[in-house]
Image (cartoon, grey):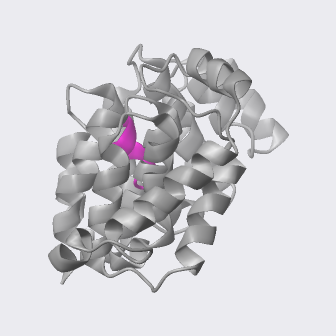
Amino acid sequence: MAEHTDRAEGPHSIRGFVAAIDAELRATGTPERADHEKAYLKSELRHYGTSVPHIRSAVKAVSRQRPPLTHDQLIAVVNKLWSVPVHERRMAAVELLDLNSRLLQPPDIVLLERLLREARTWALVDTLAASVVGTLVQSNPELASVLDRWSTDDDFWIRRSSLLALLPALRLGEGDFDRFSVYADAMLEEKEFFVRKAIGWVLRETAKKRPTLVYEWLLPRAARASGVTVREAVKPLSAPQRARVLAAR
């Protein structure tokens, strides 16, 4: 069915779906924004200059105009959008995955890992890791073993992703803080900014629901943690807790 739909022409084909999203992205982009975003992200991709709100609106608008995607159609659209090295097309692919995350199945972690490895920027990695992979792992706990492997990967974007995939559940006051602790403890003295920031980000969001848990984890590690990690992590803590952590540095 998916192959037949992909071959078929017309507004409801895979090709038609991708073409409609691409047209929407081009229509709202500007050369000035394209130059700015490319420079800001240090991107090697082409840029249309489309804002993030417009990308999200385009994906939702095109999706509403067509029958709901099946799993195989979703994967086909994502692959076609991603295959062209344009930042906004890849961001649209991520948004589409996020919008249809309920369709994803455990074997799709292979595709998601490939996209994460090819993304090379927080602007694509973060939603993929936190919202898409995080949702899939919450529904399929057996995939935590994949995160274990990611946490020691040579690619720092994959290590960052292992942390952020735990974020959705931890943000709710749930989730596997023990697993996060193992990952973060091993990465705490890393020099890579994006890893340091991810540890602080997850701690900050966890502390909004469980400040004592984060405080008791961070205090004995404060001298090992980077400034960016600590500054993020202590934001939701009480004033006395923040003072003790900062003094411990």
In the image, is residue 83 part of the stretch drawn in magenta? no
Q: Main secondary structure of the magenta part?
A: helix
Residue 180 vertical position relative to residue 84 in the rendered view, above or below: below
Judged from this view, the residue extending furthest toward the front is 9
The answer to whether residue 248 of the structure is visible from this angle is no
Left or right, residue 37 beside residue 133:
right
- The residue depicted at 62 percent of the width and 28 percent of the height is 230
Q: Pinpoint residue 233: horizontal percent, then vertical percent.
A: 63, 37
Q: Pinpoint residue 135: horizontal percent, then vertical percent.
A: 41, 67
Q: Pinpoint residue 169: horizontal percent, then vertical percent.
A: 49, 65
- The residue depicted at 69 percent of the width and 56 percent of the height is 208
Q: Quadrant of the C terminus?
A: top right
- The residue depicted at 51 percent of the width and 69 percent of the height is 99
Left or right, residue 8 beside residue 99:
left
Residue 224 vertical position relative to residue 212 in the rendered view, above or below: above
In the image, is residue 162 part of the stretch drawn in magenta? yes
Q: Quadrant of the N terminus?
A: bottom left
Left or right, residue 116 beside residue 18:
left
**Closer to us: 6 or 200:** 6
Instruction: Classify residue 228 by image quadrant.
Output: top right
The answer to whether residue 160 of the structure is visible from this angle is yes
**Closer to us: 197 or 7:** 7
Instruction: Classify residue 202 by image quadrant.
Output: top right
Q: Which residues are magenta?
A: 160-166
